[in-house]
Image: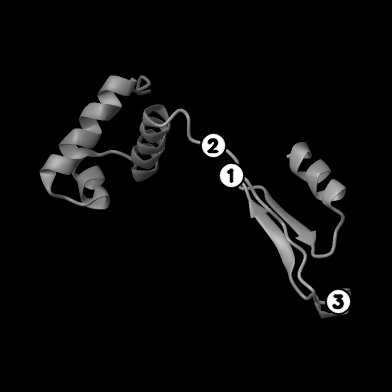
Amino acid sequence: MKSRMTLAEATAIMDRQRSSGLNVSAYCARENINPATWYYWRRRLLEQENPESPILVPLRIEKSGAGSEECKQALELAYPNGVRLSIPCGSELNLIRELIQLV
């Protein structure tokens, strides 16, 4: 069983891939690295570089002048963890706030 990679090791791998001139798939195949592992560490390193990046961005919902029977779409929020929240248009703002806080 392989030992876990450290942040320093992952950084070195990312640097070697960039300087190799190979795309990620080719580099991972050559180095016998699972591409999913490579992308996992890339995401971790990016998160470490940008610790202040917001998890949620501010959202302002404005009512259009259209009647409720003309509304055929829903507000959909997709979270980084894969959770998708679909809210029917015309929903009360308080309901939307409660749903967002639950996720």
On the image, the x and y values in percent for residue 70 come to: 82, 80
Tell me the tag on residue 10.
none
Q: Nearer the viewer, residue 10 or 60?
A: 60
User: Which quadrant holds residue 71?
Assistant: bottom right
Tell me the tag on residue 67.
3
Q: Secondary structure at mark 2?
A: loop
Q: Residue furthest bottom?
A: 70
Residue holding disc 1: 57
On the image, the x and y values in percent for residue 24 come to: 26, 48
On the image, the x and y values in percent for residue 6 come to: 33, 20
- The residue type indicated by label 3 comes to Gly
Question: Along the polypeptide, which appears first: circle 2 or circle 3?
Answer: 2
Q: Nearer the viewer, residue 3 or 50?
A: 50
Disc 2 and disc 1: Cα gap in Å? 6 Å
- The residue type indicated by label 2 comes to Pro
Question: Along the polypeptide, which appears first: circle 1 or circle 3?
Answer: 1
Disc 2 and disc 3: Cα gap in Å? 34 Å
Q: Residue at x 16, y 50 (%)?
A: 22
